[in-house]
Image (cartoon, grey):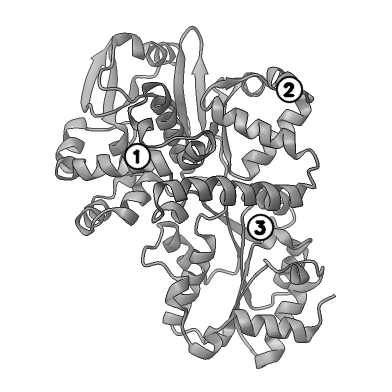
Amino acid sequence: MVSKETVMEELIRANYWWETDRVSDSHLEEYRREIFVELAEFMEEKHICGIIGARRTGKTTLMYQLIDDLLGSGVEPKRILMYTFDNPIMSDDKEIIKKIAEVHKEMYDIEGRRYIFLDEIQYVKDWSRWVKSFYDRNEDIKFVVSGSSGKLIYKNTSESLTGRISFFETSTFSFGEYCKYNGDRDLKKFLTDLDFSRMDLKRIDSKDVKIKVKHYDRELKKLFNDYILYGGIPETFHKEPHKAYKWLKEDYVGLVFYRDLMELFDIRDTRTLEELFYYIANTHGQRANYSKIGDMLDCRVETVKTYLGYLDIASLVNIVEYYSKSPKRSKRAEKKLFVSDSGILNAVRGGGKSILTDRKKIGSIVEGIVCSNIVSERSAVFSKNVFYWRSVYELDFVIKKGDDLIPMEVKYTSKIRDGDLKGLLSFMDKYLVDEGIVLTKESYETKKIDGKRIYFVPVWVFLLKY
């Protein structure tokens, strides 16, 4: 059990703005992700705020930015508390949430609203029970919690905190965010003013889009090549290529495996989990037969399913189900498995700039990038709205938007043949869909084929939407 004196010392150490009245520049980023606006507007709501997502996707930075925003709006510094549970002495105490809230109030005899930010909350057992108790007693506390194992936190708290918590998901940087972060000043202003996020997937005017981005296409193509190579984890943005891959493989994946997954799930068969992940990296984008994987890894099918669930929880993989109007058939059919970030993928299986000219590899890498960008769209937390489809021919993606189906093919090549569209056209025939999208390397075009309208758009333009 942690003493109140120790809690007090930890809080004073962590909350330096109680004395300085400001958040250090080292804890802030000039760039604010689009989700920041939603979070800032939510600060005056009573609901608990849950910021969830993959490791190193900016959750802690978002918390500091929110604190900076509260201070800027005139909130008294001592009303704002933040603690990161990277200290096992603190996180192992079952009553630590209660102690933090009580010690904070006693220290400054605070009356009225307080803001309590709790980072890496997944390491505190039964944290939701304590937060719920404060919420249900109508204590004037705005709780903001974050956790790297976002899907686990969502699953474990969605019932216990029903009606009390709202989740906001962070993911690796989308390509649109990557450009706003790394592009030059003119490009950043252009993208902000244009607001591609409002682009209607089913009403893409290829000529109009081409005119709008023409002045910036050279810079956008270069940024997309960098994004293919190094992915969307901010920590890699300013590293040398070999250092970025070394950090991703040893530090990032290592931390996810040996801290997040091993500790949270008490996994003892680490070899099988690692081999499964490396298998997915080497078969990136292919359909997976769980029985065959089990035979290859010498484990049961149930173990494969369980470990895939862990990798999904850790946001290391994206699992894409088969599209069918029958949910049972979707569940039974083979899944397509992608490593969720291209930088992690390249770091794990080895690669450099030669990837950009490797036709065999780059197509599946770009397909995975499209998948991670459309899966992470924040229309709903963890909604399953992205599928693939296959009959005689295969279609890369089917996006379900309400009752609408948007078929999408990814063809990152300079020349697209009629045979490349057979999966797209077969799906459109079967499900009576009139419009489809083909993501290309550089072609802008709208074609009518067999009475169907097909939009051809460069993938690096389309992804500016996300």
**Relative side of 89 to 78, left or right:** right
Tags 1 and 3 in contact by the CB under 8 Å rule? no
Seen from this angle, which residue lies furthest bottom?
Answer: 109
Task: Residue 10 in the image: state x and y as whole percent.
Answer: 68, 80
Q: CA distance from mark 1 to mark 3?
A: 34 Å
Which marked residue is nearer to the observer: mark 2 or mark 3?
2
Q: Amino acid at mark 3?
A: Gly
Seen from this angle, which residue lies furthest right?
Answer: 1
**Relative side of 377 to 207, left or right:** right
* Residue shown at 67% from the left, 32% from the top: 275
Task: Residue 74 in the image: state x and y as whole percent.
Answer: 45, 85
Instruction: Check the image and report above or below for 354 versus 164.
Output: above
Task: Residue 18 in the image: state x and y as whole percent.
Answer: 55, 87
Dot 2 corresponds to which residue?
A: 294
* Residue shown at 60% from the left, 69% from the top: 46
Mark nearer the N terminus (1 vs 3): 3
Dot 1 corresponds to which residue?
A: 463
Mark nearer the N terminus (1 vs 2): 2
- Element on which disc 1 rests: helix
Instruction: Check the image and report above or below for 292 versus 57.
Output: above
Seen from this angle, which residue lies furthest front?
Answer: 242
Dot 3 corresponds to which residue?
A: 163
